């Protein structure tokens, strides 16, 4: 306990940044991302004519959700969850599907409209939605004016860094804080193109640390040409120097399946409504327990200080 208190006595601050932390400097709101996703068209084959067409499939899904919810409008995470679920049940109803990919509740349902279970349409919609999220975040970052109208934001974090050592958990997909202070430690070493996660950097660092608990637009997968170098799990994520380079790797692999036998897309952007099923790969499997340990250490220190005060 004493060592924990001495550690915290050096003014180490634990901070959790919610999804709205970047809104004051132009970060996208949930409504912005949802609107952008609903505007996207999906380039797919019309099964009735066997021709390529542009369809507003995401918006059709969203309209059905809005009608169902009645008192509120759906948001992009609702839509993504529905797309994952529809794909899970579509696979489950296929007689050729292995049992490990058959959600058990699918035995009690049947499709009411086949077009909502079209594999190509579902894949295209999921891709469009993730692209919409990345584009909205990327566009907001490009408008970040650290030396102009958003200088107050930079000054706040610069001053905060000088007053204490910070451990920051963030639910945002941007890298605004890294733009302000490139020395933030996230477990990824510097690399000219991509970097492999090294948890030891977090454990041993005494610098400012940042944990992207739900992903980043800079995360991507290891290039196929480099995979013989490592024996990493194929879902593990790497950090790229730009969002454009990272996104080139996003859609070249199959998706993971949860214990419930439902699709659970583990990726650079953790979204949808099954987040806990998606935090089992590097760096998320290190970020989550690491942040929990930081918080419990802080609580332990507080409790120790209270007990000491009571004894006095």
Image (tube, grey):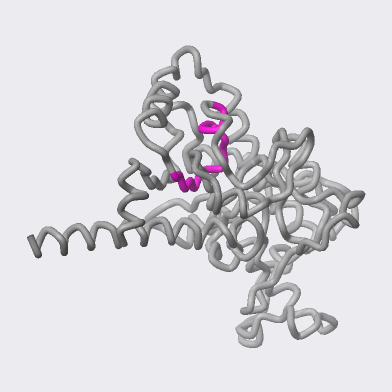
In this rendering, the count of numbered labels is 0
Q: Which quarter of the rendered picture does the C terminus lie within? A: bottom left
State which quadrant residue 294 falls in: bottom left
Front residue (pair 99, 266): 266
User: Residue 113: x, y in percent?
Assistant: 68, 68
Inspect the magenta stretch and tell me whether residue 178 lies in it.
yes
2 is within the stretch colored magenta: no
The quarter of the rendered structure image containing the N terminus is bottom left
Q: Is residue 149 above or below residue 38?
A: above
Q: Residue at x 42, y 41 (%)?
A: 166
Q: Position of residue 279 (x, y in %)?
A: 59, 62
Determine the residue located farthest toward the top in the rendered image. 148
Q: Residue at x 42, y 44 (%)?
A: 17
In the depicted structure, whether residue 10 falls above or below residue 178: below
Q: Position of residue 153 (x, y in %)?
A: 41, 24
Residue 174 is situated, as x and y percent measured from the top left of the image, at: 56, 37
Q: Residue at x 75, y 74 (%)?
A: 91
- Residue drawn at x 90%, y 57% is 228
Task: Please identify the quarter of the rendering in which residue 24 is found.
Answer: top left
The residues colored magenta run 167-179
Q: Is residue 35 left or right of residue 106?
A: left
Q: Is residue 41 left or right of residue 139?
A: right
| Relative vertical location of residue 65 with respect to residue 92 in this rendering, above or below | above
- Depth check: give the residue in front, 83 or 217: 217
- Identify which residue, 163 or 252, lies in the foreground: 163
């Amino acid at each position: 306990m004493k060592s924990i208190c001495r550690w915290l006595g050096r003014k180490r601050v634990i901070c959790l940044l919610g999804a709205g932390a970047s809104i004051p400097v132009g970060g996208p709101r949930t409504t912005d991302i949802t609107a952008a996703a609903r505007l996207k068209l999906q380039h797919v084959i019309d099964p009735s004519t066997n021709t390529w067409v542009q369809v507003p499939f995401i918006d059709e899904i969203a309209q059905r959700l809005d009608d169902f919810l009645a008192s509120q409008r759906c948001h992009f995470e609702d839509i993504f969850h529905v797309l994952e679920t529809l794909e899970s049940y579509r696979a489950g109803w296929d007689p050729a599907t292995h049992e490990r990919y058959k959600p058990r509740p699918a035995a009690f349902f049947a499709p009411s409209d086949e077009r909502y279970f079209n594999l190509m349409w579902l894949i295209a919609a999921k891709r469009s939605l993730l692209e919409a999220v990345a584009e909205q975040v990327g566009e907001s970052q490009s408008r970040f004016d650290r030396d102009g109208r958003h200088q107050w934001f930079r000054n706040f974090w610069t001053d905060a860094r000088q007053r204490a050592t910070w451990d920051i958990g963030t639910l945002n997909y941007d890298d605004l804080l890294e733009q302000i202070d490139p020395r933030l430690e996230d477990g990824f070493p510097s690399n000219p193109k991509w970097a492999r996660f090294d948890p030891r950097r977090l454990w041993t660092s005494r610098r400012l640390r940042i944990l992207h608990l739900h992903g980043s637009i800079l995360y991507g997968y290891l290039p196929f040409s480099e995979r013989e170098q490592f024996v990493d799990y194929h879902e593990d994520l790497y950090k790229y120097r730009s969002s454009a380079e990272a996104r080139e790797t996003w859609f070249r692999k199959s998706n993971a399946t949860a214990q419930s036998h439902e699709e659970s897309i583990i990726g650079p952007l953790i979204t949808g409504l099954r987040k806990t099923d998606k935090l089992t790969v590097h760096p998320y499997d290190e970020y989550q327990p690491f942040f929990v340990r930081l918080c419990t250490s802080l609580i332990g220190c507080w409790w120790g200080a209270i007990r000491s005060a009571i004894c006095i």
